[in-house]
Amino acid sequence: MDLLNNLALGFGVAFTFQNLMYALIGCLFGTLVGVLPGLGPLATIAMLLPITYGLPPVAALIMLAGIYYGAQYGGSTTAILVNLPGESSSVVTVIDGYQMARKGRAGPALAAAGMGSFFAGCVGTLILAAFAAPLTELALEFGPAEYFSLMIVGLIGAVVLASGSLLKALAMIVLGLLLGLVGTDVNSGVARYSFDIPELTDGISFVAIAMGIFGYGEIISNLSQSDENREVFTDKVKGIMPTATDLKRMFPAVLRGTALGSALGILPGGGALLSAFAAYTIEKKTKLKPGEVPFGQGNIRGVAAPEAANNAGAQTSFIPLLTLGIPPNAVMALMVGAMTIHNIQPGPQVMTSNPELFWGLIASMWIGNAMLIILNLPLIGIWIKLLTVPYKWLFPAIVLFCAIGVYSTNNNSFDIWVVALFGLIGYGFIKLGCEPAPLLLGLILGPMMEEYLRRALLISRGDWSVFVTRPISAGLLVVAAILLTIVLLPSVKKKREEAFVED
Amino acid sequence: MAVASQKDFFSGLMFMIVGGGFAWGAVDYEIGQAARMGPGYFPFMLGLLLVALGALVVLGSLRSGPPGGDKIGAFAWRPLVCILGANLVFGALLVGLPSIGLPAFGLIVALFALVIISSMAREGFSFKESMILAAILAAGSYVGFVYLLNLQFPVWPAFLTN
């Protein structure tokens, strides 16, 4: 009954009035920013990170978890009402969600997304709690060689499951790794690539990079497209509650989506995108009940299943982060950055050295999910109102929040210059068709990878075979090799390209 | 020699240049051997890897690409300059730039400048509208960031407060 004891400890920490308030505020802000078209969870978290700096670590992480869920839910709202997916994983929600909205059933679509997410979130939290302890024990047996190989698997997995060109994504990871190395080398004390700029000896602030690339880069790119064809269904949202038939139909879909999402979310690469796609594909394969609307024309199952899968995956993707200290996707990489700011090094030691934080965070994830459903269903009208605010008023505000946020990270204007530079670089990436998310992952993992590689080779006296002679490490590298070969197989490659194009 | 994908061609080129730069920079630091890595070892390897990946991207871009040549297209100069410019002016006004003798003007002045400059990124800029928006945001930021979150900013111009 360790699980129950641990969860009880967690809820004891999370259920203080203050922490509940932080969870609530986090969800509120997350939804507020996430609902804005064109801003995905990544940009939202990057933008809102600074407001958590002043808080104690537990409260800050609780608030961040709230922001994350809020941002995700906000993204679904935009997808359904505006036909504009805020992030790649809600691309499939758009298909049936938007059609439902066009038929005046936006309310039930939003409710289905909310309820599906909530159910999946509950299951995901339980899985996370159950898996955390055994995985942590496994992690304690890992030596530097195993960690290095694990990171290789994580990075390869992230690329394989992402969309777009494989080669370019790999290159973006390496670029991220290199950028992560800027600053003082911990071993020799040499300041690398700092060009004698004192601020650079601490490394490039990852908040500045994330905000520049994901915030400014996206805004500039959004502004260069016209938004005339945007259609918002504001007046048509009346009834929120789905009918009894809706509920009956979406329930098995939610179950299937949750199972799929939980399994795929643990995989490196996060799999939020993949699980949403897979869940939708499975629903499409099942037989339509008599009288049911076909997929692509507003079937409620087409909203509920991917949303559940998406959220379950979001939950279980915390598992590799919390147990192994390895971020499986870019959002989790941001979380690592946030933890480091609060002097927490994520990894197996967190659970033993800081159990309140660990279990408190897990409990607050469930609370965050519960908050969402309490907050969003009644407040849906307000979020919809927000969608009608013209973009010309929104984007100066977003630029302002980025600038204020990045300044308050270190109370240093240097980061403001850095964010502008990376805004330019980010826009360049968009123009060149380079997906920037893998870069962020590399950025966080760069220093860690170097350290583990150095230690592994120090112990083996420079013998590279250590990575293949140690069984766990060799196994992990084999997994990475298999992943790479699978996507490079011509038949799979073609399928993969098709799968990500279909929308 | 025709380029089948312009985007890939230039991104590959970018990777090669950046990777080469990092590798070249790494030579200045001690590289060492695998058993005793110097600070230059890992960046040197990664730099070479990035050059190799970039070269593969470039080669691929010559062979195949989507129909139409996958053109990069025109740069959106106006939003680019306005958004980044607004950000830079905000930073300069907020804390001042001693190197050119610019005093700190504080949050409120910087905020008005940021909103007005960034609003110019779009067609149909209206000065009056931007001023109203800036006033609302200034009030909101003052209450939210300065009063509630207690973030440390110079709020008013330095020559007024001193």
Image (cartoon, coloured by chain):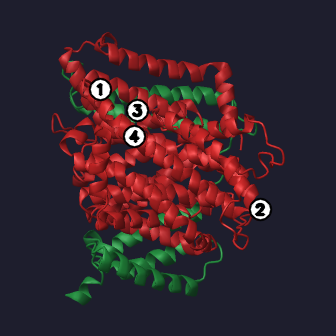
Chain colours: A red, B green
Characterize the local packing of mark 3: few (<14), some (14-19) or many (20 or more) Cα atoms within 10 angstroms. Answer: many
Point out the tag, 1 or 2, that comes first from the N-terminus.
Answer: 2
Give the label on residue A128, or none. 4
Spatial separation of the CA atoms under disc 1 and disc 3: 39 Å
Residue beneath disc 1: A138
Q: Is residue A279 left or right of residue B158?
A: right
| Residue B104 at x, y percent in the picture | 28, 78
Identify whether B69 is placed above or below A415: above
Task: Say yes or no: labels 1 and 3 on the same chain.
Answer: no
> Mark 3: which secondary structure?
helix
Q: Mark 3 falls within which chain? A: B
Among the 4 quarters of the image, the one containing residue B152: bottom left
Q: Is residue A45 something that shows in the picture?
A: no
Spatial separation of the CA atoms under disc 4 and disc 3: 42 Å
Q: Is residue A136 left or right of residue A89?
A: left
Give the label on residue A102, or none. 2
Task: Say yes or no: labels 3 and 2 on the same chain.
Answer: no
Spatial separation of the CA atoms under disc 1 and disc 4: 15 Å
Point out the tag, 4 or 2, that comes first from the N-terminus.
Answer: 2
> Mark 4: which secondary structure?
helix
Spatial separation of the CA atoms under disc 1 and disc 2: 50 Å
Question: Callout 4, which amino acid?
Answer: Leu
Q: Residue at x 54, y 57 (%)?
A: A73
